[in-house]
Amino acid sequence: MLLEGGVEELHGPELVDWPTERGLRDRLALAGVPRLLIVSEDVRPPRRLAPDETWIAAPFDRDELSARVHELAEAIERFDRAEPWIDPADVVHRGDASVALTVKEAAVARALLAASGAVVPRDRLEANVAPDRPLGDRTLEGVIHRLRRRLIALHLVVRSERSRGYRLVTGDACVAGD
């Protein structure tokens, strides 16, 4: 439809028709697959884009598509090199992207970020979340679950290390399985 036979030769992001393939966009984002949204002339692009996606207005030619794919690859590379950090307002930043956390999520994120990819024992995370009282059996798991959902937008993954604790991995380690 858009590029008579040329799209198959391009490597890189998945092409997603916006907004008709909104569900596909969401599934690809959760899987960490870069996306190039194809936006028709009469449609507005999404207000917010993830660091691993961009858009292009249809119709477009092969050179314009190649340029957008190249720009997206460079942006992803810059983003994945950026170190994540958390501010006093419990917002985690990475490159130009950020996500707000709850107090409990921020307590876990601070410990994981400070460990620089090393395993943080479960009891230490529990002490960070509730220093004055013991946590219920599933409280930390709930905090970790919500934190994972928030951090995926920053290409950050909280990994469970069986019987040892948790660690934070970034960039290519998220996709490659470390």
Image (spheres, rainbow, N blue to C red):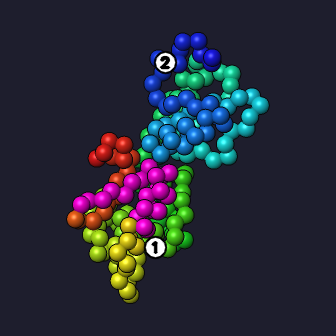
Q: Which residue is mark 2?
A: 8
Spatial CA span between label 2 and label 1: 46 Å
User: Is residue 31 visible in this depiction of the protein?
Assistant: yes
Residue 18 location in percent, x, y?
Answer: 65, 34
Question: Is the magenta region chiefly helix, strand or loop?
Answer: helix
Indicate whether 75 appears above or below 128. Answer: above
Please give the name of the residue rendered at 67% of the width and 31% of the height, measured from the top-left corner: 39
In which quadrant of the rendered image does the N terminus lie? top right
Q: Would you say 38 lies left or right of 13 here?
A: right
In the rendered image, the vertical position of residue 171 relative to residue 132, given as above or below: above
Q: Which label is found at residue 104?
A: 1
The mark found on residue 26 in the picture is none
Which residue appears farthest toward the front when viewing the image? 137
Which residue: 60% across, 44% down? 49
Residue 78 seen: no
- Closer to the chain start, of discs 2 and 1, is 2
Q: Which residues are magenta?
A: 142-162
Q: Residue 55 in the image: x percent, y percent? A: 62, 34
Secondary structure under the numbered disc 1 in the rendered image:
helix
Rendered location of residue 22, percent (x, y): 61, 39
Q: How dense is the environment of label 1, judged by Cα within 10 Å: few (below 14), some, or many (20 and up)? A: some
Residue at 30 percent across and 59 percent down: it is 160
Q: Amino acid at mark 2?
A: Glu
Classify mark 2: helix, strand or loop: helix
Splitting the image into 4 quarters, where does residue 133 fall? Answer: bottom left
Q: Is residue 120 magenta?
A: no
